Image (tube, helix red, strand yellow):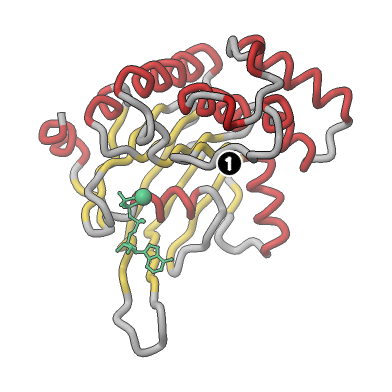
Amino acid sequence: MPIVQVNNVTKVFKERSNSIPVYALASVSIEIEEGAFTAVCGPSGSGKTTLLNLIGCLDRPTEGTITLGGEAISSLPQRKLSALRLNKIGFIFQEYNLIPTLTAIENVEYVLWLQKVSAHERRKRAIEICQRFKIDKLVNRRPFQMSRGQQQRVAVARAIVHKPSIVLGDELTANLDHKTGTELMEFLRELNEKENITFLYATHDPAMMKLAHRIISLQDGKLINEKAAIQTDL
Ligand SMILES: Nc1ncnc2c1ncn2[C@@H]1O[C@H](COP(=O)(O)OP(=O)(O)OP(=O)(O)O)[C@@H](O)[C@H]1O
Ligand SMILES: [Mg+2]
């Protein structure tokens, strides 16, 4: 069974009762298989962030359903949705991923702290992942003492330390130079291949699209033909 099923999802934003509704997503259906490394592309305003936010349980669809590991998330009460987000999703955003007052290791531990994992176990798991990611020299630094590339590496550790079902990335390389961005994406690909972690990431950058197994292309909130998208984007 796919890890994520998006069935006929529409998301309408309406600022005021008399304003014109914006169809951020219109009848979108997508399946994401476990272990997939998928890019979401499309022009600004095409609905990429909206799609990631819905899959990431940060928002609910106006119409349609989304399942995560077979569970229908669109109908869950808020409390359950938050719990699901905490346990099943890893997020990496463009910036402000890390809490500025916490050190790198405290940032990596943060989700485990929210999950009420014991202090000892938390530190053990965070240290393990920092060693594996070769960021153990950075553990006592706060975000302002790290480069953007280093911060994003810590953000990746933080996003996967609790072993989520899927990691969602929104323009996660947009603030990095080409070399650092490519290195980060190659690192994610390696994690995907070695550990079968499922990634879904939105990007504008053709170089980041090239690394994907599959490209989902959106335009005006609609899915456009996947094969055609690959030919025109690359
Ligand atoms: N909270 C909101 N309220 C009103 N309209 C919104 C809201 N969020 C998104 N939209 C609108 O929905 C559409 C899709 O936005 P979205 O942020 O998903 O696009 P995107 O593809 O991520 O764009 P970008 O590449 O610029 O990040 C846009 O027209 C946007 O203005
Ligand atoms: Mg966006």
Q: Identify which amino acid the numbered label 1 is placed on.
A: Gly
Residue 138: image x %, image y %? 64, 17
Q: 102 left or right of 146?
A: right
Residue 152: image x %, image y %? 50, 28
Image quarter of residue 109: top right
Q: 231 left or right of 83?
A: left
Image quarter of residue 202: top left
- The relative height of residue 20 versus residue 209 in the rendered view (above or below) is below
In the image, 169 versus 215, the foreground residue is: 169
In the image, 142 versus 42, the foreground residue is: 142
Q: Name the quadrant of the C terminus.
A: top left
- The relative height of residue 109 versus residue 57 in the rendered view (above or below) is above
How many C-alpha atoms fall within 10 Å of the one at disc 1: few (<14), some, or many (≥20)? Answer: some
**Residue drawn at 56 percent across, 30 percent down:** 155
Q: Secondary structure at mark 1?
A: loop
Image quarter of residue 173: top left
Residue 106: image x %, image y %? 73, 30
In the image, 164 versus 64, the foreground residue is: 164
Number of marks in picture? 1
Residue 66: image x %, image y %? 49, 54
**Residue drawn at 56 percent across, 53 percent down:** 57
Residue most extreme to the bottom = 18
**Residue drawn at 60 percent across, 14 percent down:** 135
- The relative height of residue 167 versus residue 70 in the rendered view (above or below) is above
**Residue drawn at 67 percent across, 17 percent down:** 129
Residue under label 1, please give it: 69
Residue most extreme to the front = 145
Q: 80 left or right of 199?
A: right
